[in-house]
Image (cartoon, rainbow, N blue to C red):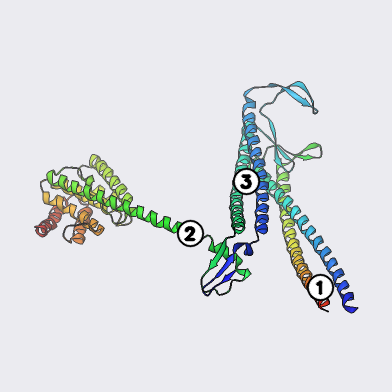
Amino acid sequence: MASSASLLELQRDLENKANDLSKLQKDISKNHQIRKKYTIQLGENELVLKELDLLNDDANVYKLIGPVLVKQDMAEANANVKKRIEYISAELKRLDSTLQDLEDKQNNKKETILKLQQKIQSLQAGKGKA
Amino acid sequence: MAESVKGTVTSLSSLFPVEEAQKAAKRVEETISERQKQLDQLRDFAADNNTLINLVQRLPDELHHDIMVPFGKAAFFPGRLIHTNEFLVLLGEGYYAERTAKQTVEILNRRGKALEVQVESVKALMQDLKAEASFFDATASEAAEGLVEIREDYIEETSPKEASMIGIVKPELPISSQAEDVSHVKDEEYDRILSRLAELEKEEEEAENANQEELGSDDSDVGPGHVILEEEMKSLELKERGESSRFQSIEKFPDHWHVEGSKATSKDCLVPENCLPENLAYGKFNLTENAPTEPQAKEDVEAPVIAETKADGRPSEPQFDSTKAFTGSIVEHNSDVNSKVQSVSRSSKPVSRFKMQRK
């Protein structure tokens, strides 16, 4: 029977698509988490920058690297934090664009799955009648 | 569903299945509890911050503190804190700065403020969520009760897509009650205005009587009858100011006082309407000072005020407002000391006219 063969094929197709969709959703949620982390870091870095700006030039600043505190130059620390903020902002932008991409893909997948389901249903109905 | 000629009746549960509404409500509740946790955490942070601030403030009071130093998880050994005014403050991201106690407290205060801002934002979020939850709950219970939605308007078909319309239909009740509220408020306001008007009228009458009885009587009673109640306060204020400055000018410049007064007026009042009462007050004072024996002059200055209040719809004196108001301002701007007499004579002219009109 040709119709039953096509039906089987369609069902397999649907399964594959569903798997893809769940993968995409996982990716999106992962992306969201990363994004959240970065936003928190950005806030922290901005706070640090504000505090560093308020410090005197001759203040002692240390950076915790592993278990040791390493003394740092004020200017150096300032530059480092600024660079970090830049990096995080760029990263956030990148994440936003990928997120947008993923969501578009997800929507497309959803649509195709819906169409497949309808096809299968109509096929089954036709079979029932026949 | 009963279809009639005029409209449609849709049971709410067909638009919103009870389970669906309950599910939605549940989900919102979950988010609320999540936010609550976040809020609690933030509050903990704020409390920690406050205790830390207290500690940091107290530490430099002594040169050293005897403390028990934690050693591992369970052990302590006696120790002593020295350098009580030196702190290594974590700024975040692994950066530390050496600060004094005072500077540390400043940093901590800033941090506390940031925390407060966060707490406020979370609170606002929770309020929104709560409103949403209550909406879902209401929908669920209404759907469960078998409430029906009746539509009678020119929309001929109620398609499932219009389900969202119910959100608009329902809040109509609160809106209408709000409208009632507004009208109620308006009534109250109206009453207040009326009572205020009556008060002013009485005041004015009293003032008039007082003026007729005695010339030097206080002129602050002159009714500040303004049509617009909003301006009332302003004008009262202005008048008070005018009076006070007037007394000042009396003290300082007994001879040139009304020159000084007119200056103050022009400075104080940008809008001519607003400075009317003040002008009047000046004009009046002017007249009483210069021509204390002329009761007509007194009445003349009174006139503009009456004319002004006429717009309130109360029984008033002859229509003379523009002329009177003008005379007042003429008096006002005769800032020359030499023209004192002139101003009196000028102002007394319209007075006689006014009197003629009255009689």
Q: Quadrant of residue B220?
A: top left
Q: Viewed as shown, does residue B263 lie left or right of B183?
A: left
What is the CA distance from the residue labelled 2 to the residue labelled 3?
33 Å
Instruction: Give SS at disc 3.
Output: helix
Q: Which residue is mark 2?
A: B175
Q: Are marks 2 and 3 in contact (CB under 8 Å)?
A: no
- Mark 3 belongs to which amino acid? Gln
Q: Which residue is mark 3?
A: B118
- Mark 1 belongs to which amino acid? Ile
Q: Quadrant of residue B312?
A: bottom left
Counting other residues with Cα less than 10 Å from the Cα at mark 3, is it few (<14), some (14-19), or many (20 or more)?
Answer: some
Q: How many marks?
A: 3
Can the viewer see residue A83?
no
Reply above or below: B241 against B5. Answer: above
Q: Quadrant of residue A11?
A: bottom right
Q: Are marks 3 and 1 in contact (CB under 8 Å)?
A: no
Reply above or below: A121 against B192. Answer: below
Foreground disc of the pair 2, 3: 2
What is the CA distance from the residue labelled 2 to the residue labelled 1?
49 Å
